[in-house]
Image (cartoon, grey):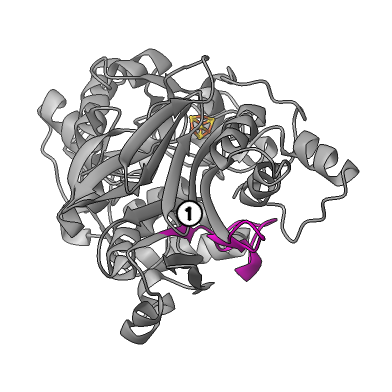
């Protein structure tokens, strides 16, 4: 998911629209916006890309200078319109809306607790759990209910809560999910990624801290900590694959991270070849780094059709395979007769890698050496990144040699966890749990089905 919020800017819906546009890479299944003008809330959400979901008439109907929005990515168990956020809630103390990027690991415990008290749910989203927890005790001031509710939540999350005159922006205490704050004119914006600030002309102020809730209203910005416990375990996959290269996360630019990981990848896993190519788009920076460090020329050996969704977030195997077929082509005149180093950001199931290796061989490549700018992915993610079940992962039960044979490469090499962390230039610690199995939180439900919001 990608989340975006605006406070104190005229025609907030138009700004949110552009903000979500810049976050489109974080989810293509659906999009939604909620705004407030006075007491009245307005919502529109639908399945589809941001520019399919909204048009000028719809945006004009979303009135007010305050609002939040989200883009959602396809997920097997939590798909469809019901799961497109923000969710909108009616309450006699005032309507409100919630959007979230992430996944709680103790959602079952919380929903059991709430259901024992009489709650019933329309969805299995963490946003709905948060809404119920916030309204559990109507006698308390809202902010204290929010602090209490967040304290009960374990996992990775970036919540935006919208009321008629206020936005609350909260980040998990482990620092797994990104959330940044910016200034736009006299108002404020909050976003999953800083790349959206550039597009709308906003100035980056700072990241929301792990365990922090920022309140944005007519008094400006106020910060509160809902937990004394604080870590900086940013999701490594944000740097490796998810985020846009022009975003900065925890002070480290994503393109710079990827390029450095490519340089380190060459030092750890050199290969003799004629050209280095990257798998578009998220691997191009790492391929540049690999080429720079090795002295092997960097070439554009693969071209991607721009208007097809990302491969590993398609919900079914069939769709994933078709996705690969439809969106990548090898450039025959470049790869024909060449020994190739193909740099990719990660291997999840191996479906994509196998297809690309075959594409390159069909186009005349004499050798294909696959180099991965992240460690071997062996475990699933419980924090909202749909990296698949452990059984489906190429490397969960295979050696390096077996994985290499599965994708039909001449050789295969991965970046070490140490170099993955070092590629941040010391800006940040990282969560590397899907590679190392060391999860920053308890898992509560143990090896639960991967639940993604
Ligand atoms: S387990 Fe992997 S995908 Fe999930 S938050 Fe950690 S690094 Fe990111």
Q: Secondary structure at mark 1?
A: strand
The residue lying at 62 percent from left, 37 percent from top is 145
Some atom of ligand 1 lies within 8 Å of the CB belonging to the residue at label 1: no
Observer-nearest of 136 and 392? 136
Residue closest to the eye, 389 or 232? 232
Q: Nearer the viewer, residue 358 or 94?
A: 94
Q: Position of residue 342 (x, y in %)?
A: 30, 40
Residue topped by disc 1:
162
Is 126 located above or below residue 43 in the figure?
Answer: above
Closest to the observer, 149 or 416: 149
- Indicate yes or no whether the magenta region holds residue 203: no
x, y percentage for residue 350? 52, 43
Please give left or right for residue 261 compared with residue 316 in the image. Answer: left
Residue 344 in sight from this viewpoint:
no
Residue stretch in magenta: 68-94
Residue 450 point in image, percent of width and height: 67, 42
Q: Quick one: which residue is furthest to the bottom in this view?
A: 57
Residue at image coords 9%, 28%: 295
Q: Name, please, the residue furthest toward the front.
A: 139
Quadrant for residue 235, please give it.
top left
Tell me, yes or no, whether the highlighted magenta stretch contains residue 80: yes
Q: Could you say which quadrant of the image residue 308 lies in?
A: bottom left
- Looking at the picture, how far across and down is residue 189, in whole percent? 29, 50
- In the rendered picture of this protein, how many numbered marks are placed on residues? 1
Question: In this rendering, would 359 be left or right of 85?
Answer: left
Question: In which quarter of the view is residue 434 placed?
Answer: top right
Q: Residue at x 65, y 66 (%)?
A: 82
Q: Is residue 326 visible?
A: yes
């Amino acid at each position: 998911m990608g989340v975006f919020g605006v406070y104190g800017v005229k025609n907030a819906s138009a700004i949110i629209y552009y903000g979500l546009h810049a976050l489109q890479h974080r989810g293509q299944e659906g999009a939604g916006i909620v705004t407030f003008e006075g007491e009245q809330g307005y919502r529109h959400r639908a399945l589809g890309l941001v520019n399919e979901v909204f048009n000028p008439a719809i945006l004009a109907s979303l009135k007010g200078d305050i609002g939040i929005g989200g883009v959602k990515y396809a997920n097997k168990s939590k798909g469809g319109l019901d799961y497109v956020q923000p969710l909108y809630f009616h309450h006699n103390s005032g309507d409100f809306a919630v959007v979230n990027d992430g996944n709680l690991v103790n959602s079952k415990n919380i929903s059991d607790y709430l259901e024992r008290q009489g709650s019933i749910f329309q969805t299995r989203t963490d946003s709905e759990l948060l809404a119920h927890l916030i309204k559990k005790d109507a006698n308390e001031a809202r902010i204290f209910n929010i602090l209490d509710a967040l304290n009960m939540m374990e996992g990775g999350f970036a919540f935006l809560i919208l009321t008629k005159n206020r936005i609350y922006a909260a980040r998990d205490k482990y620092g797994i999910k990104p959330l940044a704050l910016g200034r736009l004119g006299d108002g404020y914006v909050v976003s999953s990624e800083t790349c959206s600030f550039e597009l709308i002309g906003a100035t980056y102020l700072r990241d929301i801290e792990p365990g922090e809730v920022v309140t944005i209203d007519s008094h400006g910005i106020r910060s509160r900590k809902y937990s004394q416990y604080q870590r900086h375990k940013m999701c490594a996959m944000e740097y490796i694959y998810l985020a846009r290269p022009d975003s900065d996360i925890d002070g480290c630019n994503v393109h710079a991270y990827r390029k450095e990981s490519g340089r380190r990848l060459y030092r750890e896993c050199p290969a003799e070849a004629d050209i280095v190519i990257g798998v578009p788009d998220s691997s191009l920076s790492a391929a540049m780094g690999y080429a720079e460090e090795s002295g092997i020329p960097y070439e554009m050996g693969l071209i991607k059709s721009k208007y097809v969704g990302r491969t590993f977030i398609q919900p079914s195997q069939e769709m994933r395979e078709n996705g690969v077929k439809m969106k990548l082509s090898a450039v025959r005149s470049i790869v024909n007769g060449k020994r190739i180093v193909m740099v990719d950001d990660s291997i999840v199931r191996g479906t994509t890698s196998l297809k690309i290796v075959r594409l390159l061989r069909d186009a005349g490549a004499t050798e294909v050496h696959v180099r991965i700018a992240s460690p071997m992915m062996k475990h699933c993610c419980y924090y909202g990144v749909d990296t698949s079940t452990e059984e489906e992962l190429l490397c969960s039960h295979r050696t390096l040699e077996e994985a290499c044979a599965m994708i039909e490469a001449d050789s295969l090499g991965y970046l070490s966890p140490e170099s993955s962390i070092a590629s941040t230039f010391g800006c940040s610690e990282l969560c590397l749990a899907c590679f190392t199995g060391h999860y920053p939180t308890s898992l509560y439900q143990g090896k639960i089905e991967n639940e993604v919001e």
